[in-house]
Image (cartoon, rainbow, N blue to C red):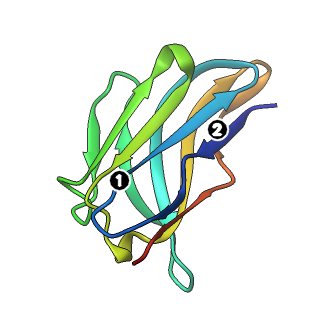
Amino acid sequence: QVQLVESGGGLVQPGGSLRLSCAASGSIVIIYDMGWYRQAPGKQRELVATITRRGSTNVANSVKGRFTISRDNAKSTMYLQMNSLKPEDTSIYYCNARITALGVPTSDYWGQGTQVTVSS
């Protein structure tokens, strides 16, 4: 019954900004590490950024200085603020989280993805 749902994707011009959200719902006990991944056509899924439950973050070199990951544990929601977007950022962005839920062993969950397109 645990679900992750991404939102906030869309079409933006180079240099523009978007904020993605990932909301977790269901019989959640605790959410541990979370992360954003992206996958472009013909390419493997790559890690964009991660954040621990207490807020320690890591971002990929390709987006460092432009993207910021954050989370609100009270809302079971993670965010990705994307600034200075480039055409090469175009991809489907996926949310991932390690979650303990009622009656279920701790496991990783994935969202359905949200499309980000950077084009002029």
Q: Count the labels in the image.
A: 2
Amino acid type, residue under disc 2 in the picture: Ser
- Residue 88's tag is none
Please name whichever residue, 63 or 11, is drawn nearer the observer in this view of the structure. 11
Residue 93 horizontal side relative to residue 89, left or right: right
Tell me: residue 27, above or below residue 60: above
Tell me: residue 80, above or below residue 87: above
Amino acid type, residue under disc 1 in the picture: Ser
Q: Tags 1 and 2 in contact by the CB under 8 Å rule?
A: no
Q: Nearer the viewer, mark 1 or mark 2?
A: 1
Residue found farthest to the bottom = 42
| Figure quadrant of the C terminus | bottom left
Residue 29's x, y, as percent?
Answer: 64, 16
Residue 9's x, y, as percent?
Answer: 54, 54
Please name whichever residue, 119 or 39, is drawn nearer the observer in this view of the structure. 119
Reading the image, the residue beneath label 1 is 17
Residue 99 horizontal side relative to residue 14, left or right: right
Residue 6's x, y, as percent?
Answer: 61, 45
- Residue 107's tag is 2
Please name whichever residue, 90 or 43, is drawn nearer the observer in this view of the structure. 90
Q: Earlier in the sequence, mark 1 or mark 2?
A: 1
